[in-house]
Image (cartoon, rainbow, N blue to C red):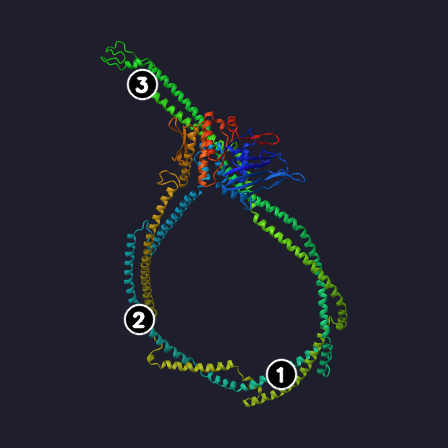
Amino acid sequence: MRLHRLELCAFGPYAGREAVDFDVLGADGLFLLHGETGAGKTTLLDAVAFALFGRVPGARGDVKRLRYDNADPDLPTQVVLELSVQGQRLRLARSPEYDRPKRRGDGFTTQKATASLTWLSSDAEGITRNDEVARTVERLLGMTAEQFFQVVLLPQGEFARFLRSDTSEREKLLEKLFGTQRFHDVEQWFRERRTVVGRKVEQHRAQVREQVARTAQAAGEQMPDEAAESWLTELSDRVAAEVATAEAAESASREQVRLAETELARRRALADRVRRVRRATEQIASLPAGERDAWRAELAAARRAVGVKAAYETARQVERELAEVRERERAGIRRLGPVIVEDDPRGQAGRLREEAGSLRQLVAEAEQLTADQRRIRQQDAQREQLESGIRQLAGALTQLPDQLSIARQRLDQARDARTRLDSVEDRWKQLSEIAVDADRLPALERALERAVAGDRRAVDEHQAAYDRFLDIRQRRLDGMASELAAGLVPGGPCPVCGSAEHPAPARAADGSVTREQDAAAQRAEQEAKQRREQAAARLRSAEQECLTLRDQLAGKDAESLKADLKELTDERDELRKIAAWVDRLVAEVARLEEETRRQTERHAEAERQFAVVVSELATLRENVGERAERVRLARGEFPDVAARREHLISVADCVDAVATARDEAVAVEKRLAAQREAVAQAAVAAGFDDVPTAIAAVRSESAVAGLERRLDEAQKVEDAARGVLAEPELAGIDPTTEVDVVTVETEAAQARAALEAAVATLRSAQQRRTELAEQGARLRSTWASLGPVLAEYDELDALTDVVIGRGQNARAMSLRSYVLAARLEEVAVAASNRLRRMSQGRYEFVHSDAAGPRGTRGGLGLDVLDDYTGRVRPAKTLSGGESFLASLALALGLADVVAAETGGALLDTLFVDEGFGTLDPETLDMVMDTLDELRAGGRVVGLVSHVEELRQRIPTRLRVRKARAGSRLEVVA
């Protein structure tokens, strides 16, 4: 990637339009960006980042104030960047969201953020959507915004903090740079897979426990704590013995039932023969004697009266017909009312029908008149409805353009919110992490206070112990003569003078000290010194933790961070809420456009229908007047012509009905006289004295059947009873004999109950044996299936522990940590090459994969090897200038490794921001040699610095001049 030209307008501290030609600045491969503090040097780097990704790095990206406050309202805030990447030359143009004064009235209006990408090396169509521009830039560069900020815009302050940070903070940065999410996914897959297989093992174990319980239940036993094959065999033997015992008991019970049933059958047969003889004797005695003769006489009379009854019923039917005909005649006369029936009713009905026929045509005209009048009312209502509809449609058509405009504006806002949401989400995540760290600051400050107090206390205690040791040592030296004298032996040489005579050995004075007291004081001083050193180490650790955390918080406290986080959370939630309306607003705009077209068509159609209705109304009103007069004359005193016609037809029908009823009455009277004569003749022929006697002898069919049935039943009973008594097996049976069956039945029932109990016991035992065999087979199968699953889980459990850094993992490093450690080792190797040259061979990076204190994850340790002492020391102990060299080397090494890792574009343009002021002239020469190596490879390096000496060393410079009216750029070549 190589930058060619940067243009910015009303951006940051720049009030007007400024341009930077990187091709001119980078002609020598190295240029200096300098100017007063706050002039806007870093803003140029922010402009490059904003053009590429739509946001600026670091804390500056959290503040949405990229526009110059006093810029001309008509001057837009914009950044334009031309660059070459992946063989393509393109131009990026972006404008941030900002508030500008309204052109009319007071207040401000929001100018939406815009973005565009134009291909300068081809005729391909450009891109204007914010998200599509961002994705295209990331694809061409091969890195995200965070990676770009780290490997192209090299802020030494952040890399110095990286050197001092702990394992977790380094891990977060390296994860962002090297994209190790896939290794985290692998670890998660192993965890989830182990959980799944573990559940499978538990399921199999539960199945084993359940099958053991079922097996024990099948055998009628309690479930054992531990079940094995021997337990199952013992159960099978026990159940088999129970089956054999039950079979013997069932056989004995069955023989007892057979004997009892045989005796019961003999007793029952004898009791049945006695009962049959007794019943037959009783039936013969109970038969009626005189009643059967009366039944026979009544039955014969009823059979002779059947013919008389039929003739009599026919005469009664003719009488009813005559009454019905007379009633119809009277009803017809009542319906006629005031109309008098003439002597010739048939002729009178014909004249009435002729008059009704003449009114048929006028009935049709009356119906048409009614239809026309109804049509006029309908047309009037339709005309009024059309007028109202036309007014409503006209009103709707005047409102729809405004509604459509508002919907389009809301759609633009929602799309813009969706574009801005990604950057807000990223800023929210960063600020959330910082806010979490802020909560730790009070505890760290309290720990620092305790460490300071502990260090002071340890210093005081050591000083007191040291003073006491010196005092005791001095007193021992003062009394050394007496100590030596105490060791003299008569005749032995003096250790001082060598004489064997000791005329006046020294004596111990008051307050003298022994060797043991001196040694104890020395040990106490050494222990106090060790405690002092430990307290000093704790103090340094607490100071470093507080310093690191304060650097991260950049002067903000927890409350302000939480307030910023809440404000950003509200903004994110609001953007989510607005962005969620995009699809619905797209549909709403389409609906309003379709509604406008449809309402326009409906308005035109309503106006056309209104004209047609007005024309039809005029025609109808002309025809209704003439027809109404003709109908009025034809209906007379009736409501309408049809009513008058119906009245005439009804009267004619009534006259015809009266004539017909009179004719039918004459015929029915003749039939009635003939039928009465036939009834009298039939009664005499049947042997009755008169008709009433014959009718009294009549019986219904059911009564006749009842008489016949009683006679037949009495005869059948007598024949059956005599037949029973004549049976050979009943010969000699006395009907008074008594047979005891109940006692034998009780004995048989008891034998059957005993048999049923024995059979139930046998079946229960056999069922237990069957179920035990079935459940035992299932239990053996369940035992067999548990083994492979348990083996699979043991293997997966051990492998998962290795992947996540436990178990047999000797390094105690997870897969992701191992990958990050390997990447960090690559970075350390690449950075050490430059650090050795810049430090004249004194320093190089040392990567460590050892675990940290208190179980901290290993693999991300980064120290420096000091060639002067030959020892590895923490990077935190480097001086300010040395920290700059180390962070610059680390930044350059990290840039090389990340570019190679991501497979991104070659980074032909780099920016190094500040830190040169801490270097001495000789070290500065080494740094410049390193930078010369970078540009010798075809790269362009821009240095951002206040150092005066760099202005003498670098002839090509870009100066930023600060002024009240806004900063300006000046190129010095």
- Residue at the disc numbered 3: 515
Q: Secondary structure at mark 1?
A: helix
Residue 621 on image: x %, y %: 75, 65
* Drawn side of residue 24 relative to residue 746, left or right: right
Badge 1: residue crowd in 10 Å (few <14, some 14–19, many ≥20): some
Q: Quadrant of the C terminus?
A: top right
User: What is the spatial separation of the Cα atoms under label 1 and label 3, in whole angstroms?
Assistant: 165 Å
Asked whether the viewer can see residue 942, the reply is no
Labels 2 and 1: the sequence-earlier one: 2
**Residue type at tag 3:** Arg
- Secondary structure category for the residue under label 2: helix
Q: Which residue is at the front of the view, 650 or 404?
A: 404
> What mark, if any, has residue 741 been given in the picture?
none
Residue tagged by mark 1? 319
Tell us which disc is closer to us: 1 or 3: 3
Mark 3 vs mark 2, CA separation in Å: 125 Å
Tell me the amino acid under the disc marked 2. Glu
Residue for badge 2? 263
Q: Is residue 240 left or right of residue 91?
A: left
Closer to us: 16 or 106: 16
Q: Position of residue 290 (x, y in %)?
A: 46, 84
In terms of depth relative to the viewer, which is nearer, 161 or 83? 83
Secondary element at tag 3: helix
Residue furthest to the top:
503
Query: Is label 2 or label 1 in front?
Result: 1
Indicate the amino acid at tag 1.
Answer: Glu
Q: Quadrant of residue 769?
A: bottom left
Q: Nearer the viewer, mark 3 or mark 2?
A: 3
Against 722, residue 623 (above or below) is above
Pointer 3 or 2: first along the chain: 2
Residue 418 image point, x, y percent = 55, 44
